[in-house]
Each structure stands twice: as structure tokens, then as C-alpha cells.
Image (cartoon, helix red, strand yellow):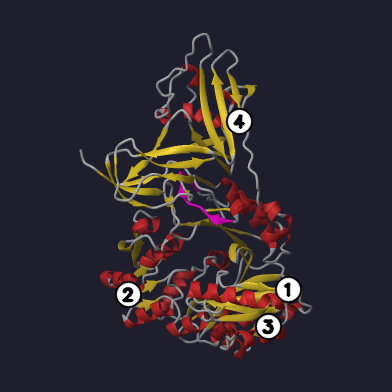
Amino acid sequence: MISSLLIANRGEIAVRIIKTAKQMGIHTVAVFSDADSESLHVSEADERIHIGPSSVNDSYLNLESIMNAATISNVDAIHPGYGFLSENYAFAQACRDSDILFVGPSPETIKVMGDKSAAKSLMQESGVPIIPGYHGDDQTHDFLYKTAEKIGFPLLIKASAGGGGKGMRIVNCLNEFSESLSGAQREADSSFGDSKVILEKYIQKPKHIEVQVFGDRDGEVVHLFERDCSVQRRYQKVIEEAPASQLQVDLKRNILSAAVKAAGSINYEGAGTVEFIIDTEAPEPDTSFYFMEMNTRLQVEHPVTEMITGYDLVEWQLRIASGENLPVSQNKITLSGHAIEVRLYAEDPINEFLPVVGNIIKLHLPDGKGIRVDTGVSQGDQITINYDPLLAKIIVHGEDRNKSIILLHEALTKLRCIGITTNQEFLIKVLGHSVFHSGDYDTNFINEYKSDLVSENQIITHEEILSAVNFLCNKNLRTGLQSDSFVNSPWALSDGWRLNLPSRLTFHFLFGNDKIDVEVFDDDKESIVINGGLSHCSLDNISDDIEVFRSETNIYIADNYKQKRLIYVDPEIEFETAKVNSGGLSAPMPGKLTKLFARIGETVEEGETLLIIEAMKMEHSVISPNDGVVEDIFYTEGEQVEEGVDLLKLKVNNK
């Protein structure tokens, strides 16, 4: 049995692997980059080794750094997790050459299944159904053009060496082919270093079904049933469930059999996933499925399989890597109930699901019977652009699909992740959608019902605005006393007194593209004016259900599971002073860098304006907090910047 294990990964999967390894009495070693020095997976491990800068290419994708860490820690085995080097055959070969167990299949298996063209040829030879198309070596334009004409349209062009939607084009007619081919080849070459493509018949309404398989050194292969991963955006899975609903008995049996045959044909060892697509419009449903690809690693969505079978798949991986046989035979593997997993991402559904960065001010994860959460983040963590935006996976297990949906919906409404935009509200809407409930959907579900699932325009209520005001002043506006949280405000030393006028405090906020001005008068009516409109209400009557948090200029308002962000600004402050972190000046708020006065190598004085950031049509000057020399500038005029990012590096003169 393995006695020491290095986890060549980060985030939730590293934490997940460490948990099982510790339960098995295995010494765990975490690796980390500069950005991850305080991350959860680092603190959970028995030992930790630094492997390089924050960039993935210099750390988690740096094979030499990973192998050096394995040598230093003298481990027996390396678990690659998923992503990064997990499907890099050179990594598996490096482990073999160093007499270190690689928790996964052989380098040869990884190599052949990682090449879509070779994999499809092998599957075809083994009798596993593949999508009609071409996956050969002739990559000349004229040959591919004529082949495409024979296959028919619509047609899909895919990069042979990779996935994730890169190097992929849908072609609707022959006139579009040449331009689409050139674009796919360029993107494939840029993303994977290989311009080779394959051509496939395009399935317009597919279901994405995958099967979890395991094999051992004796050639035994079993399946642990299937998963439905059809809820996707940009070819990336969002919700996974097991078992798949809406599958006819014969079709399910045929898919499971094909998956075992696929794994057996290559003497597969360890955990793997065979992915299929089902043509929901095919006239013969029993034979309407096709092999898509095989992932030679543990999948992100493996917890749903664990929930319905009761087996720890990481433990299986470690035992098989140690040379043990499969723990159970196929007839002993049964399923119970239904499991669903959702992926909580740091992304903005309104902005085409683009990743976002920020600081997690508050994190409360749901728990309870039938609820499991896998995460690699903690409250206070800074989410950066360096890595995948996955924050957590929320998994539930119920007696049936309907009860699992209800339980997951309830769990998501209890989740709080304040300080960063997430897809939480989007996930809740998916779970509540009637089409999702029916199970009668395909991979186009999100695109087809996007207007139902994504709220384009947020609305903020007066009560929510007043919650922010109340928070800033800590309910002491009427007495002129200011709370510690408001001590840096220009109002901190003022009681708001005006001759022959009621005392007044003024607040300026930005919400999306809208400016919000709030005036609070401490007269007999406790009058409050919002954008010129007079209302008579008391700050004491704000709902206790509304929570308010502050991070720099951001005010986060959480009402139930919905989160809204106000930016607090004050035009009476002439200069907006940036924070200084280790010689770097960081942006005080998100916005556009409109003017850059500083120059590299230039000497600047304390109070000198270095640049101007425009936020919602208001300019904010960033000034030098000290005398010093500008050593580096990280942005140019016209670029958008996020709050907290380093704008420039200043070498401070010691006085």
C-alpha cells in the first residue's frame, strides 16, 4: 500500500484527495504556487512544498517542478487529480522513470486516448459506435473539403488534441467550410500545439451521458453506472446527476456495455470516464448513442457516483495504483437513490459567464442530511485570474430525482458567498425550471432558456439602499456619532449641524450604471431623500433579513440568497488614495484607467497624482502615498481594472 502521496493539484480536488488519503493512513504532500500559500489544500496536508510563481505554466503545469517536489518529499506515489497534468502522458512516464507510482492509467493509454483521432479509430475497431465522420491523418484542405461534402451538414470540426470547446466550429453549409476549417486549425494549434482536426456529423440535440469505469492490473473492468451532464454552457458542465433520467432500459444497458468494452479493449487501469452523446432525434433510440471521448482520470463530477453507490472512488484509485484488484465485482455494485451536483463558479452569468475575481468576505456552506460540499476555498480567500473559477461543488442525495432537486434547491438558498459574483442565482433558476424538472432537455438547454435563467437587469430597492446607509453609520446618524466602520469617511468628525437647517448626511453610491444619491435629515420626520425623491421612513425599520458587508469601496447587500453590490463614492474627496501592498499600488475600485501620468523610472512625490480611474462616469485620482520611484506599470490607458489589482510598483524612499 502507498505510504506517502503527493497531490499534483490544488483547490477542491486536492482537499478531496487529501481527506481520503489521511483516512487510509497515508502521509500527504501538497504543492502550492505563490498565490496558493494560504490555500485550504495547503493547510490540510501533512507536508507542503512550494513549486513556483502563480502562473500555472510556472507551477502546476511545470512537470520539472512537480517531479522535484516528489524527489524532495520522497513520496511513493503522485495523484494528478483532474486538469493540469492529469492527462499528460509525459507526466505519467516521468513518474514511471522515477519509480514513483502514478495514480492513473499507463502513459501509453493516456497518449492513445488523448488523441481523439487515434481513440476513435481504436473504438471503431473494438465495435464501440462512433459518430459518422473522418478522423484520419490526411489534413489537406482539398481532402477535408471533399470529405465534409460526403459527410453532410451540419458538420462539426474539432481539434484532435484537445477539448473544452477550443478548436471547435459548427459548419452549416459547404460555403462556410473553408473559413471554419482555417479558424479551427489556428485555434487548435494555438491551444494545443497541434492543428490536426477531425470531422463529425453534428448532432443538433444531443444528450451528454458518461459512464464511470474502473479497471485493475488483471484486466477486470467494471462500471459504476452513468451520469447525465447535459446542462452545459460553452461546452463546460454545470450540473451533473446520476443516474441519468429519461434513458430507456435497453439504451442504458447498451451504453454501459459499450463503456466496459471500450475500457477493456485498452486494458484500462484505474478510474476513467467514457463519454457518449445521444441523438435525441434519432428514429431508433436504442442505438442512437456514439462514443465521444475517454477521460483518463477522475472527473470533477465523481461525487454523484459515490453518492449513489456508496463507494469512495479515490480510495479505489489508491488501492488499484498499489497493485490491488478491484474491491468488488460488477454484480455487487448497486445504486441507491438519485444524486445531483452543481458547480458554484466565480463567474458572471449576465456577462456571458465570464470568470470574475474578488475577495470572499463571507462564506457559509450548506450542510445537513443528504448534503455534501466539496470546496477548496475559505472565507477571506482572494479569487484570482490565475486558476479555474470553480469555488465549490454542492452535491445532494435523495430517494428519487424530484426529492434531490428539492433538497439541492433548499441547500443553494442557504449558501452565502459574499464579496464575489457567482452563478448561485442562476443555478437556483435552473433547478426551478419546468424543463429541467421534466428531464426532457439536451445540451442546448441553457441557450434555449437563457432569458428564463439569467436576469439581465438587477433592481435595488429603497430598503436595500437604506441598509447600506444604516451599515455605514452603524445606526448612529441621528446622534452624529460615527461607528468604527465609518471612521475614514469625511463625515467621521462631523455632527451634520447646519445653521437654521436640519442636520444632514449625504451618501453617493454607484449601482451598475446608475448613480444613487442619498440624503438623511435628522428632523422630526427622519426624512430620507433618494435621488431627489422624498420618503418618510425610519432606519430602525429595515428588515433583519438583509445583511450588509463592506470591502474597501464595495458595499454588498445580501437579501436571502441574492447579492447586490453598491460602490460607495464621495465626490468631495479630491483624491482617492490607493492601497500599498509590498510596494505595489492597488486599485481602490473597479473602473477604467483613463489617464496615466506616471512613467517607469520616474521619481514621484507624496501626494502626486499618478493616474486616474473612471468609474461610472466619475473620475478618481490615485495619488502617491510616499516619495519614491516608479519601478513598473501594469496597465495602460483605456484598460479596465478590478478593485485590488496592482496598478504599478513603487519603490518607496525611506525618510
**Tags 2 and 4 in contact by the CB under 8 Å rule?**
no
| Identity, as a three-letter code, of the amino acid under mark 1 | Gln
Marks 1 and 2, the one that precedes in the sequence = 2
- State if disc 3 and disc 4 touch (CB < 8 Å): no
Instruction: Name the residue located 35 percent from the left edge and 82 percent from the top edge.
Output: 96
**Mark 2 secondary-structure assignment:** loop
- The amino acid pointed to by label 3 is Ala
> Which quadrant: the C terminus?
top left
User: Residue 536: which numbered mark, if any?
Assistant: none
The numbered mark at residue 248 is 1
Q: Which residue is mark 2?
A: 76
Return the disc, 1 or 3, that comes first in the chain's sequence: 3
Magenta segment range? 353-364
31 versus 186 height, above or below: above
Residue flagged by tag 2: what amino acid is it?
Asp
Residue located 67% across and 86% down the image: 147
Circles 1, 3 touching at the beta carbon (< 8 Å): no
Within-10-Å neighbours for mark 1: few <14, some 14–19, many 20+: few
Q: Earlier in the sequence, mark 2 or mark 4?
A: 2
Q: Which residue is situated farthest in the bottom direction here?
A: 125
Label 3 SS: helix
Q: Which mark is residue 148?
A: 3
Left or right for 634, reference 281: left
- Between 540 and 610, the one lying in front of the other is 610
Residue under the image location 67 percent in, 66 percent down: 443
- Closer to the chain start, of discs 1 and 4, is 1
- Judge whether residue 371 can be spotted in this image: no
